[in-house]
């Protein structure tokens, strides 16, 4: 399963645009085209989610 599906589901749950977030695993930024296998994720791997803030 591609990360874009999981990222989209997360955005729907929190009712925000998916582009407001950056996702990473073990210090590596996750793009929507990748899969858990492409990052050698193990079961119960934790994905970090960061909220992007634009200051003005």
Image: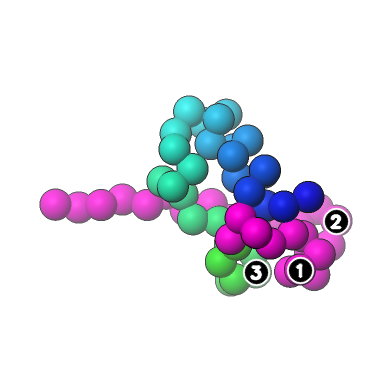
- For mark 1, what is the residue? 38
Residues at marks 2 and 3 touching, judged by CB atoms closer than 8 Å: no
In percent of width and height, residue 55 lies at 20, 52
Residue found at the very far left of the displayed protein: 56
- For mark 3, what is the residue? 26
Frontmost of labels 3 and 1 is: 1
Q: Characterize the magenta stretch by its predominant secondary structure.
A: loop
Pick whichever of labels 3 and 1 is earlier in the sequence. 3
In percent of width and height, residue 39 lies at 74, 69
Which residue: 49% across, 55% down? 22
Left or right of residue 35, residue 10 in this image: left
Which residue: 60% across, 62% down? 30
> For the residue carrying disc 1, how many other residues have a C-alpha within 10 Å: few (<14), some (14-19), or many (20+)?
few
> For the residue carrying disc 3, how many other residues have a C-alpha within 10 Å: few (<14), some (14-19), or many (20+)?
few
> For the residue carrying disc 2, how many other residues have a C-alpha within 10 Å: few (<14), some (14-19), or many (20+)?
few
Q: Secondary structure at mark 2?
A: loop
Pick whichever of labels 1 and 2 is earlier in the sequence. 1
- For mark 2, what is the residue? 43
Left or right of residue 13, residue 5 in this image: right
**First to last magenta residue range:** 31-56
Q: Secondary structure at mark 3?
A: loop
In percent of width and height, residue 17 lies at 44, 38
């Amino acid at each position: 399963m591609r990360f874009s599906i999981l990222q989209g589901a997360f955005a729907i749950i929190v009712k925000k645009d998916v582009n407001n977030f950056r996702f990473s695993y073990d210090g590596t930024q996750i793009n929507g085209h990748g899969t858990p296998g492409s990052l050698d994720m193990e079961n119960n791997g934790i994905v970090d989610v960061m909220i992007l803030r634009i200051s003005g």
